[in-house]
Image (tube, helix red, strand yellow):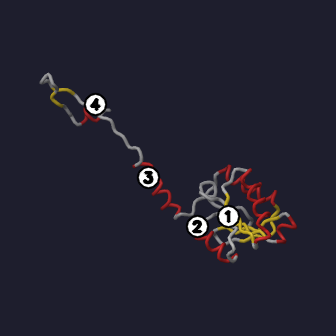
């Protein structure tokens, strides 16, 4: 609203007198788009866990384990996480590779051992893989990590 004064803007009205215009500055999408572009570039598409569009990909090893994968997904969804189950009939290596290319922060694989023990195996984008993590322990670490909005994905002891 102060720009007309700063630029000494005037117009001649119907009464042939000079009037000061009212100037409205409006940016609906421009600044948001620039901000998101900078954010994506800064993180190189590898968003922190709390900001990632899909926070965890759950990959059952075979079709028989899809119900267990859905159960794990529902547990994570109940905690407020954004989760996808990849139940396609592809090889596990292909599913893992595609989840890595999508830059999904957490990749959980569900096999028969995990189902029997009530655990999960977790792979992070930095290549860290941990097998047999109890679901309760995993949930505590992930929910605390998201609540604190940490940038580094340091869920496991190195």
- Which residue in the structure is indicated by mark 2? 102
Which of the numbered marks, if any, corresponds to residue 57? 1
Q: Residues within 10 Å of mark 3 (few under 14, many from 20)?
A: few
Pick whichever of labels 2 and 1 is earlier in the sequence.
1
Q: Quadrant of residue 9?
A: top left
- The reply to whether the C-beta atoms of the residues labelled 2 and 1 are less than 8 Å apart is yes
- Which residue in the structure is indicated by mark 3? 33
Q: Is residue 65 left or right of residue 104?
A: right
Residue lying furthest right in this view? Answer: 116
Frontmost of labels 4 and 2 is 2
Mark-to-mark CA distance, 4 and 3: 27 Å
- Which residue in the structure is indicated by mark 4? 22
Could you say where residue 94 lies in the image, as x and y percent from the top left?
65, 76
Task: Give the structural element (helix, strand or loop) at label 1.
Answer: strand
Mark-to-mark CA distance, 4 and 2: 48 Å
Q: 43 or 87: which is nearer to us? A: 87
Task: Give the structural element (helix, strand or loop) at label 2.
Answer: loop
Q: Residues within 10 Å of mark 4 (few under 14, many from 20)?
A: few
Q: Residue at x 19, y 31 (%)?
A: 10
Pick whichever of labels 4 and 1 is earlier in the sequence.
4
């Amino acid at each position: 609203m102060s720009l007309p004064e700063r630029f000494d803007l005037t117009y001649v009205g119907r009464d042939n007198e000079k009037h000061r215009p009212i100037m409205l500055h409006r940016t609906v999408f421009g600044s948001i788009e620039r901000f998101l572009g900078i954010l994506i570039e800064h993180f190189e598409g590898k968003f922190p866990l709390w900001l990632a569009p899909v926070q965890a990909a759950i990959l059952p090893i075979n079709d028989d384990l899809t119900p267990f994968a859905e159960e794990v997904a529902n547990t994570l969804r109940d905690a407020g996480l954004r989760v996808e189950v990849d139940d396609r009939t592809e090889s596990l290596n292909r599913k893992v590779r595609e989840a890595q290319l999508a830059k999904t922060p957490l990749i959980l694989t569900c096999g028969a051992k995990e189902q029997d023990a009530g655990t999960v195996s977790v792979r992070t984008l930095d290549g860290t893989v941990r097998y047999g993590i109890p679901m309760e322990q995993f949930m505590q670490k992930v929910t605390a990590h998201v609540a604190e909005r940490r940038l580094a994905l340091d869920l496991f002891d190195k």
